[in-house]
Image: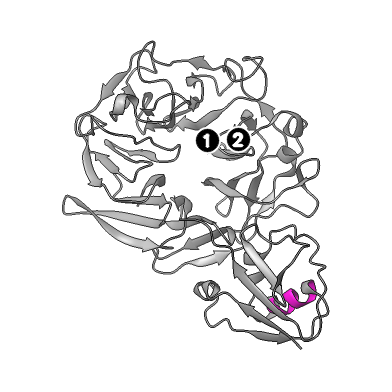
Amino acid sequence: MIPTLLLGTRKGFISYRYNNNRWEVENLSFEGVPVSIAYEDSRSGTWWAALDHGHWGVKLHRSKDRGKTWEELTAPAYPQGEEVKDGMKAVTRYIWAVANGGKSFPSRMWLGTDPGGLFVSDDGGDHFNLVKSLWDHPSRKPYWMGGGRDLPGIHSVVVDPRDDNHVYVGISCAGVFETNDSGSTWEVRNKGLWADFLPDPQTDIGHDPHILVAAPTDPDILWQQNHCGIFRSTDGARNWQDISQPGGPARFGFALAIADDDASQAWVCPANSDTTRTAIKGALCVCRTDDGGKNWKTLTKGLPQENCFDIVYRHALAGSGDALAFGTTTGNLFFSPDRGEHWQTLNNYLPMVYSVQFAH
Amino acid sequence: MATVKFTSALERFFPGIKEIHTNGNSLREILAEVEAGYPRVCSYLLDEQGSVRGHVNIFIDGSIINDRDGLSDPLSKDSEIYIIQALSGG
């Protein structure tokens, strides 16, 4: 386990550090400001904070000294004249994904945003440019729509560690798109998904992958917690299989984490279906599969089992080695040292948690 | 000269920001002068398409501006311009 936890919360950026067998708060930055993503670029150790000021707009900051000081960068901005749809100007409403560009492009950073624009920087984040090829994709204006937010948003950017030109993005609602040329061209990768909220559930575009993740040990194996179930691909997203638990809780939710060392092991944080979005039967659980989704185990030891309303947002579950951590909508933070078998409460009094990441 | 006054909430991001006097003939010109004095401040007040952010209010001589996109509301060389935050959030 790497020994730091970065949290993006509704009231600030919070880091925890593991010292002497206990987690302690190391840093609080941007107190009072919503932080949509708290992110460490593992290549450099640089911390990133994507802010969602209620009054002053979306901002982007980075820190090279573990949050002691922060540098404000120019936030991603849509070029003049760009429109979400005819008559609606495009402005950055939210940063929903932050990803580094991989070892081949040490200065590259990707940002996913609401209202649906992907941005890239090749100078370490000093300047971000809209990826026009995806923004101008012919499907965007007629078929992309809001899901989780009012307008379409890119919440997942998955860079293939074997080839940093190879990138997937997850869009709510549109689905999964893949590029093999650093974003010059894009292919739709939604075959096998199911969208029961649309007139045609097997539509090509319009799916709602809540989060998209690739297995570190085999990046051709991708998982997604989708609005309509849990799906897994073993062929680089060309075909998706529904691996939701028949009759069990592992179906609806937002977050998903894959084991560092096993492409068949993953965790989800189930929630009641989209009608209520609360903990199932007032009890919090994590579900784990050890066999690629054939079977699911419900893990509850140490988690509240009554009078609980918590759910876990899409970026708020993370793993590192045997360790897992997640933060909830009601400000609880839980840690497991043993792949979810047992859980410890780190804090009951946080703000709503938007993102959790293990960091160095 | 027109006077521009700011909500104290901006001091968190622009320490020492204080009212300024400008020779601008339009709100956009005035904001350009503000930006020159406090780089990046306009990105806090306006979105990237140049519209006033949804939770920012600008008053000219006591009246809230009408043209939040074009910033064409009339003003005089002696106008007082208040830039404040809307009361929202929790």
Above or below, comparing residue A302 to residue A38 in the picture: above
Q: Residues within 10 Å of mark 2 (few under 14, many from 20)?
A: some
Q: Which mark is residue A162?
A: 1
Q: Name the residue: 66% across, 14% down.
A: A200
What segment carries the magenta color? Answer: B28-34
Quadrant in the picture for the N terminus of chain A:
top left
Q: Is residue A49 visible?
A: yes
Q: Mark 2 is on which residue type?
A: His
Q: Is residue A277 magenta?
A: no
Q: Is residue A54 left or right of residue A253?
A: right
Above or below, comparing residue A208 to residue A47 in the picture: above
Q: Which mark is residue A166?
A: 2
Instruction: Label 2: state its secondary structure.
Output: loop
Q: Is residue A51 left or right of residue A246?
A: right
Residue A251: percent from left, percent from top = 42, 20
Q: Mark 1 is on which residue type?
A: Arg
Q: Chain of mark 2?
A: A
Q: CA distance from mark 2 to mark 1?
A: 8 Å
Residue A186: percent from left, percent from top = 70, 32
Q: Chain of mark 1?
A: A
> Residue A284 sits in which quadrant?
top left
Closer to viewer: mark 2 or mark 1: 2
